[in-house]
Amino acid sequence: MGAVAVLSGGGCGDNLACAPPPGPLPEGRLADPSQLPLPADCVVGGLAEITGRWFLVDPSQTFAFGYPQFEGSCGAGFRRAFAPPEDHDASDGQTYETWSDGTVVLERQSIVYQAGAYELTAAWAFCMLPDGTLAEASGYYDTDQGTKTATARGTRFAPRDELQRGLTLAGELGTSVTGTPIQALDLAIEGAHAYVAGIGGLDVVDISDPAAPTPVGHLDGSFNDVEISTGDGKVVAYLSPYGGGRTAVVEVTDPAAPAVLADLPVYSHTLFRTVRGGATWLYLAASGPDIPIFDVTHPLAPARIAQTTVPGPIAGVHDLFADGDRIYAANTRAGLVAFDVAAGWDQPHELGHIKTSYSHSVVVGVAGGRPIVVHGDEGMTATSDGAAFLRVLDGDPSAPGFMTEIGRYQSRPEVGIHNFQLVGDLLYIAYYQDGVRVIDLSDPTRPREVAHYNTWNPETAPGGAFEGALGVRVIDRTVYVADDLRGLLILRAP
C-alpha cells in the first residue's frame, strides 16, 4: 500500500499507529495520490476530525459534488465509508487501495479492460483545513482523454431537520418481486398500481393497501421515466431508457406479466402525457432541440403525429410541460423556454425565456387564483443565484410580466431539486437528500414550506450527488415517492 517516504505528514498527536503502513506504492498512473494538489495548510493529525458526512463540491463545475462519509481512527486508519473493499491483486485488471497517516487520506482505483487496451484510473486525497473544512484533490486518467485533476472543498452535512412534519410514512417497498432492490428514479400511478421505473427495471406494485405495497410484476431493463396510457381495454407503459436507447412500449394489462411490445423509434430522457381533444398525446424530451409527439390514444398502436423544435439556443431539452398550443421546455443550460405552435408544429414562436444555471423541470398551473409556471433549477454552482432553487413565474401569457419571477423557494444551497407536482395550491417536491418538501403557493409571491418527510438516511446513503427522493405523484393526499435508495415510499398528509 503506502510508503513512509511519500507521506510526510505527522501522526495524530504522538500516536505512532497513525504512521502509514510500510510497503510499495501501487504501480501505474496516479500511483502516488499524495502528489495531488492538496493545499499546503493541511492540519497535521487533523483526520481525528474527519469522521462523519460532508458536502463536497467543486464550485467551478455544475455537477461536481457529493456527500461522502468518512470513518476510522488513528489505530484503524481512515477511509471513506461505502468505499469498495481493498483489492491489491491486479491480475483481474482491477485494484482499489486506500491508506492514511492521520493527516491525509489517500485512495486509488484502477480498471484495465479490453485486453489492456483501455484504462480508467482515479485517485483522491483528502485532508482537514484549519477552518474546519475538508479539502479534496482528485486525478482521473482514461485512455481517450488522458489525465485530469480537480479540487473541491467540503463542509459538514446532515439532515436539515427532523424526520417528518405534516407527512407520515404509510408504507414502503424496497424489494422487487424478483428479490432485487428497487432503485427507483420515477413512477406513475394508474388505478390500484404504481409503475416504478428505475435502474433495475420496471416494477409494478399493488398499492390498494398503502400500508402494505406488494410487488406483482417486473421487467428487466434500466429506465429513467414512465408514463401510462389506457385505452381499448389495454394498459401500456411508455419507458424512457436510462443510459441511451429507444423509448420502450410495454403492455402491463396483466400487472404480473409486463410484456415488451416494441419501441418508439426515438430516445427520450423524460416523458409528458396529456389529454387533448379526447386524444392522449405523449411528448418526448429527447435531450436535443426536437420534441417528438405521439398519439397514444390507442396504446397498442402509438402513432407519431408531429415534431417541433425549441426556438432559440439549444442545450438539450431535459423535461417539458404542454398546455394546449403552448410548450414549456426545460432546456438545461440554455434556460427555460416558453413557445407556442398555434401556427403549426413547424412554426414554433417563442413567448418567453429565462436564463438558468441548469433548467431541469417545469410545471404549469394555477395557484392562489393566478396562473403560474414553476421551474426547478438543478445547477449546483457557486453563481450569484446560489446552487439549485425553485422559481415561481408569472404564468399569464397575456400579461406584460409573463415568465418573470414572482417568487422563489430553496431548501438549502447544498441540495438539488428533482421533480415536483402541483396539486391545488400545494407543490410537492422530490428534493433528493432533503426528501419530500411541500410548499404552499396560495400566495405565489411568497412560497412557504408547510410539510416535509426526510427519506434520505445519512447512515446508509453511499453519498452520490443524485440520491434520495427523485419522483413524486400525489393522489387524494396520498404521496407516492420514488427513491433510488429505498424504492417506493407512500406518505400520508392529514
Image: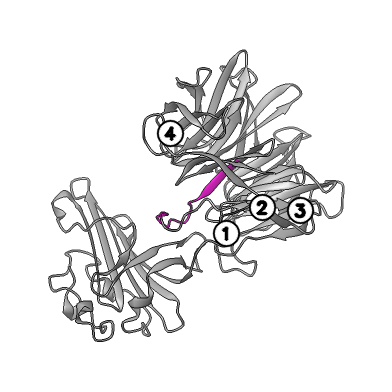
Quarter of the image that includes the C terminus: top right
Q: State which region is magenta.
A: 460-472
State yes or no: discs 1 and 2 in contact (Cβ < 8 Å): no
Q: Which mark is residue 393?
A: 3
Tell me the residue that label 4 is attached to: 201
Magenta span has 470? yes
Residue at horizontal 57%, vertical 47%? 316
Q: Residues within 10 Å of mark 4 (few under 14, many from 20)?
A: many
Q: Residues within 10 Å of mark 2 (few under 14, many from 20)?
A: some
Tell me the residue that label 1 is attached to: 162
Q: Which mark is residue 451?
A: 2
Query: Relative to 48, is 476 above or below?
Result: above
Q: CA distance from mark 2 to mark 4?
A: 31 Å
Q: CA distance from mark 1 to mark 2?
A: 11 Å
Q: Position of residue 137 (x, y in %)?
A: 36, 71
Q: Amino acid at mark 1?
A: Glu
Mark in front: 3 vs 2: 2
- First-in-chain label (1 vs 4): 1
